Amino acid sequence: MLNELYQEIIVDHGRKPRNFAVSTQANAILEGFNPLCGDRLTVYITEKNGVVDNITFQGSGCAISMASASLMTEAIKGKTIAQAKELFQLFHQTIMGKKNTATIEQLGKLSVLTGVTEFPSRVKCATLAWHTFMGALNHQQQTVSTENEQ
Ligand code: ZN
């Protein structure tokens, strides 16, 4: 039952991604690419006084990559940069299979993606938006590629 619900949320966000737009106000923009699957997206962040005031994305890819990006924007919009980085760490550790119940609870809706842990090739789909987000925060200019991820 739980898996079905998770599946539904992923399909919903994959088909109708939230915050799916180019942002002209963004002060950090970066492109991410997952060559294994062909997922490609651009993340637009508007950072104001240490807070993620707005975050949007655009791109195309599989349902997992689009749903993950969509859920990410919902999860970190309005959070401080520190909180967003903390959430990235939690999400990343969980999806890499180092999860425990505490982190699942802290992840909220993002936990719907933890099912991909068993499928290493899909892990890159789920983490693409997050690595792109982190790269943008670090003012990286070069396209983020999941090929360089361990
Ligand atoms: Zn993908």
Image (cartoon, helix red, strand yellow):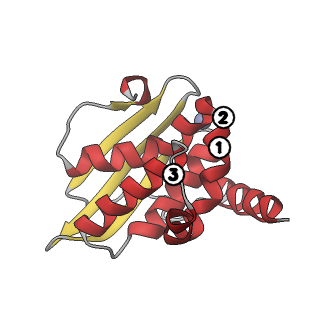
Is residue 25 visible to us here?
A: no
Judged from the image, the secondary structure of the residue bearing numbered disc 2 is: loop
- Amino acid at the residue labelled 1: Val
- Left-right relation of 137 to 21: left
Q: Amino acid at mark 3?
A: Thr
Task: Report crowding for label 2: few under 14, some 14 to 19, many 20 or more residues within 10 A (C-alpha).
Answer: few
**Rendering coords of residue 149 (x, y %):** 39, 29
- Quarter holding the C terminus is top left
Q: Could you say whether the residue bearing mark 1 is in a helix, strand or loop?
A: helix
The mark closer to the camera, 3 or 2, is 3
Residue 48 image offset from top left, x and y in percent? 18, 72
Badge 3 or badge 1: first in the primary sequence: 3
* Residue at image mark 2: 119
Q: Quadrant of residue 21?
A: bottom left
* Residue 5 lies in quadrant: bottom right
- 118 and 52: which is toward the camera: 118
Position of 140 relative to 147 (above/below): below
Task: Find out whether the residues at labels 3 and 1 contact each other: C-beta distance under 8 Å.
Answer: no
Say if residue 137 shows up in the picture. Answer: yes
**Distance between the alpha carbons at the discs numbered 3 and 1:** 10 Å
Left or right, residue 111 beside residue 78: right
Taking 9 as reference, is 1 left or right? Answer: right
In the picture of the structure, the residue carrying the numbered disc 1 is 116
Are discs 1 and 2 less than 8 Å apart at CB?
yes
- Where is ligand 1, by quadrant? top right
Quadrant, the N terminus: bottom right
Nearer the observer: mark 3 or 1; the answer is 3
